[in-house]
Image (spheres, helix red, strand yellow):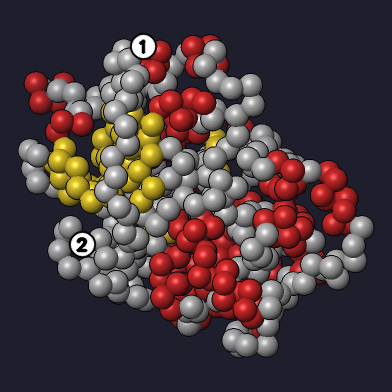
Amino acid sequence: MRLQRRKIGIDDFEQLTVIGKGAFGEVRLCRAKGTGEIYAMKKLKKSEMLSRGQVEHVRSERNLLAEVDSRCIVKLHYSFQDSDFLYLIMEYLPGGDIMTLLMREDTLSEDVARFYIAESILAIHSIHQHNYIHRDIKPDNLILDKNGHLKLSDFGLCKPLDDKYSTLLLENDDLTSQESISETEGQSGCDKVPWLMPKEQLQQWKRNRRALAYSTVGTLDYMAPEVLLKKGYGIECDWWSLGAIMYEMLVGYPPFCSDDPRITCRKIINWRTCLKFPDEPKISDEAKDLICHLLCDVESRLGTHRAEEIKAHPWFRCVQWDRLYEIEAAYKPTVIGDLDTQNFEKFPEVEGPPSTMPTVGPWRKMLTSKDTNFIGYTFKKSDVLRSLESSGTDMRSNGSAKALL
């Protein structure tokens, strides 16, 4: 009983290699001093979250991880805070993310893509069943364990389903301004916005994709049009994102990619004329049909009513849904030892200036406690709103170790 009552804190962990960075902090390997267990520590700076209005999103992320017990999503072991940071201690998945796999392989075979799209469906459905919308499904957030099986991560933009009609704000709000949209609609489809970048530009986009993922705008390539247009949206926006990922797995780049975020937005909004398939590489008619039934209007989008609509598609004809996580994975990453980080980007170990924040104060009122290891107090919205800027924006956490960001 004494052990159960004991509060877990940062002093209980030895901090090791940095494997990811995001808008509010970093992710690094850590070792529990008492047991030697290896975890991934997500460290979030409170002052940044407050100034950018992200308190509710972090609270949703932590609550979802605590509520959803699924082998398809990253497992949360502990959550606690000190005067400067919030900490989420999660399982470490050493296989890297799907973005890293795509950067290495360029394209995946239909068999490999089918396996990972199928596991992604199970992962996304597992949070939908708990009435959450993820809103940030992308290759960076699909992580592989040491055996090559996929888990969903990064719930910093997730929303409870009963809040489905709120809008997802972008930092550069003019990307989706009415003026920009009207300008686009005045064009005939993609006449002035080529649906496919020249080969040289496409190669440059591929080289820079990791850097683009760190941009303050975030990754627009996988966002549904109803999200960009600030219309009401629900779980169906996650299935659009999965369709864009499937296209990228088979073709080599997202369907609406551009090195200019404005053009990406316009292509997505004009998806009817901008969604095309290149002559090479060849993909099956069934794969094209599934993509077209995910990248379409909400009313006809597969998954809008239930995930079984997608599972029943002919492209998944041979998938054994109940045994996906028992069978051998379609790809096995190279992992050597518990501390292996070769499947993640390398980050310099640079310490920031010492904190000048007080050790006590309103920072400790940010999250609601739901377990005995969470050090926090009752959240009072009024306490935080006084500290927020007048217009907060949704900042999308990005990074190579999307296990966690």
Q: Secondary structure at mark 1?
A: loop
From the viewer's perspective, tell me whether residue 178 is left or right of residue 319: right
Answer whether residue 260 is visible to the viewer in this image: yes
On screen, 2 above or below 233? above
Instruction: Pinpoint residue 365: horizontal percent, then vertical percent.
Output: 40, 16
Instruction: Pinpoint residue 136: horizontal percent, then vertical percent.
Output: 54, 50
Among the 4 quarters of the image, the one containing residue 367: top left
Seen at 54% across and 35% down, the residue is 160
Seen at 15% across and 41% down, the residue is 14
From the viewer's perspective, tell me whether residue 242 is left or right of residue 112: right
Disc 2 designates what residue? 340
User: Disc 2 residue type?
Assistant: Asp
Q: Are marks 1 and 2 in contact (CB under 8 Å)?
A: no
Among the 4 quarters of the image, the one containing residue 375: top left
Instruction: Pinpoint residue 198: horizontal percent, then vertical percent.
Output: 68, 78
Seen at 30% across and 52% down, the residue is 348
Q: Secondary structure at mark 2?
A: loop
